[in-house]
Image (spheres, rainbow, N blue to C red):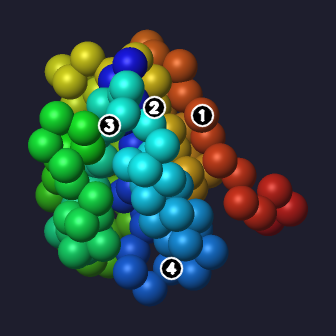
Amino acid sequence: MKIAINTLSITPSCGGIRTYLVETLRSLLRLDDGNQYLLIGAGLNRDLLRPFVVPGRMELAEVTLPRDWKWLRVWQEQMAIPRMVEAWGAEALLSPVGVATLRTDCPQVVVMQHPLW
């Protein structure tokens, strides 16, 4: 199975969600050798994601995202990510920061860290 992971909102300075993502990626590499993963990130979190890249198992695709452009991040999540997911042939999309991509045809898992906000 090909699974894409939206990491655009996760930066090195994030707290709990960064820990969640890092530990999830470590576990996937350790326990799952049957699936392929596409980490969708940006320059801001490249150094965080690069250690998890393993050719044929976990790849990194980047979108252009200036540091403080939150609206551009939303635009990328709603426009660029669906195209990337489709082009890569993803069968599922994991969004660990509570943001669903509205225009994708594959099933999504959206992780809600703080449901009371």
Kindly identify which numbered label has been placed on residue 41.
Answer: none
Q: Which is nearer the N-term, disc 1 or disc 3?
A: 3
Q: Which is nearer the N-term, disc 4 or disc 3?
A: 4
Q: Which residue is mark 2?
A: 93
Q: How many residues crowd mark 2 within 10 Å: few (<14), some (14–19), many (20+)? A: many
Q: Secondary structure at mark 1?
A: strand
Residue 107, x across and y down, in percent? 53, 19
Residue 72, x across and y down, in percent? 31, 57
Q: Which residue is mark 3?
A: 37
Q: Nearer the viewer, residue 84 or 79?
A: 84
Q: Which is nearer the N-term, disc 3 or disc 2?
A: 3
Q: How many residues crowd mark 4 within 10 Å: few (<14), some (14–19), many (20+)? A: few
Q: Which residue is mark 4?
A: 14
Residue type at mark 3 is Tyr
Q: Residue at x 62, y 75 (%)?
A: 16
Q: Residue at x 25, y 38 (%)?
A: 57
Contact? badges 1 and 2 (CB < 8 Å): yes
Image height of 46 relative to 110, above or below: below
